[in-house]
Amino acid sequence: MFEKRLGSRSWISLFLGASLILVGPSWPAVAPAAEFVRGNADNTGDRDITDAIFILTFLFLGGTPPACEPIADVDSSGVVDVTDAVNLLSFLFLGLGTIEPLTPADLLACRGLDPRAVARGQMVYKTAVEFSSYACSSCHHPVPDSQSDILLPGYSLFDALRRPNYKGGQRANFLGAANVCRTDWMLADVWSENAQEFKDLMAYLESQSPPDPAPALVFEISPPAKTGPATGDAAKGCELFNRSCMACHGKNAVGTAIPGTDTLLDIAQPPFDPIDPIRDNPDELRKKIRLSGPIGTVYGDILIGGIMPFWSKDKISDAQVEHLVSFILATREQVRTGKPPIECP
């Protein structure tokens, strides 16, 4: 009878008032949440009654402010006030209303990031440098590699800011790793820590990054496992080529124009006479796949030169190398004899 006369909101207010008296304004240390969530005002990972108490303690008793305003803005009104605590309790205990997920702009605010810097950083990630035609996106996904069907020779930048070291332990921080890419593959000037492009790229990567530490990368750069005639499946090689090599060499290996030039990074096309010492030689093709890259870099002297990135064993297996080599040799032979290049989906 008392509950009906007061109404649900008044009942919640009385209940919450009693909770505040019991809990008081002191607040325990807060562990960072795995992800920011609207309604998880104390940022402990779960939405519960303590979040409503946290909001009211902040508003009326001088308590700790939320880690960012959107997580305490339960009703998405743009303002943190008493209705947010009431709406959270209504949602939790009475099944009333909904709590909208945080927007991308909310998440940027919670991470302390400038949306303009993030947008500029995304363009840095996507834009090729003038002399090499490489961009960060040429070799690295911004999402976990497992979420894309396209294989890239570099590792995902999704958690790159959380790793303890880089380039097989040869660089201590992300700036050092980025500058290896810029000098050795992109043929660009090094960045300083205060370079605007670098800071913008960091903002973009931070906007994508998980909060937890990531392990150092473990990969193997090794000479080809086989020599002699190719023993792979050309059809499988064509399919793999169009998932891995196509970005630079074109679908079905027929070439991609280097921006600003008439040059094609073709593999299936001539020259055929005399025999091309690399593209018609299975051993040389294997070495290009496994060991291509600037000599004397952080990887030592194992690389054989050029700015094509190498493919480590965990990216492309020895069996897959054979499929690629078989496809390249087969499609070149078709073109050499006047037939069209091999095509696959």
Image: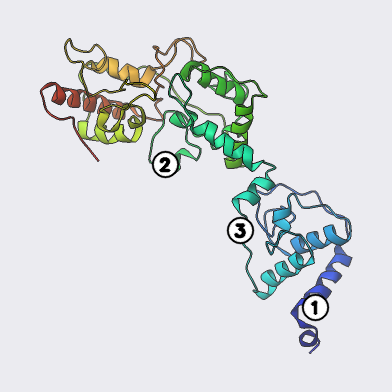
Residue drawn at (28%, 23%) of the image: 266
Which is nearer the N-term, disc 1 or disc 3? 1
The chosen color scheme is rainbow
> Mark 3 falls on what kind of element?
loop
Q: What amino acid is at disc 1?
A: Ser
Residue under circle 1? 10
Q: What amino acid is at disc 2?
A: Ser
Quadrant occupied by the N terminus: bottom right
> Mark 1 falls on what kind of element?
helix
Q: Is residue 235 above or below residue 223?
A: below
Assess disc 1: are there few (<14), some (14-19) or many (≥20) residues with their C-alpha within 10 Å of its C-alpha: some
With 144 as the anchor, is 1 left or right in this view? right
Which is nearer the N-term, disc 1 or disc 2? 1
Q: Is residue 108 above or below residue 270?
A: below
Determine if residue 111 is in view: yes
Q: Nearer the viewer, residue 39 or 219?
A: 39
Q: What amino acid is at disc 3?
A: Pro
Assess disc 2: are there few (<14), some (14-19) or many (≥20) residues with their C-alpha within 10 Å of its C-alpha: few
> Mark 2 falls on what kind of element?
loop
Which is nearer the N-term, disc 2 or disc 3? 3
Q: Which mark is residue 101?
A: 3
Q: Which mark is residue 148?
A: 2
With 275 as the anchor, is 97 left or right in this view? right
Q: Which mark is residue 314?
A: none
Residue drawn at (50%, 40%) of the image: 143
Q: CA distance from mark 1 to mark 2?
A: 51 Å
Q: CA distance from mark 1 to mark 3?
A: 27 Å
The picture places residue 272, in percent across and down from the top left corner, at: 18, 15
Q: Is residue 189 above or below residue 314?
A: above
> Are the residues flagged by discs 2 and 3 in contact, CB closer than 8 Å?
no
The picture places residue 96, in percent across and down from the top left corner, at: 65, 74
Q: Nearer the viewer, mark 2 or mark 3?
A: 3
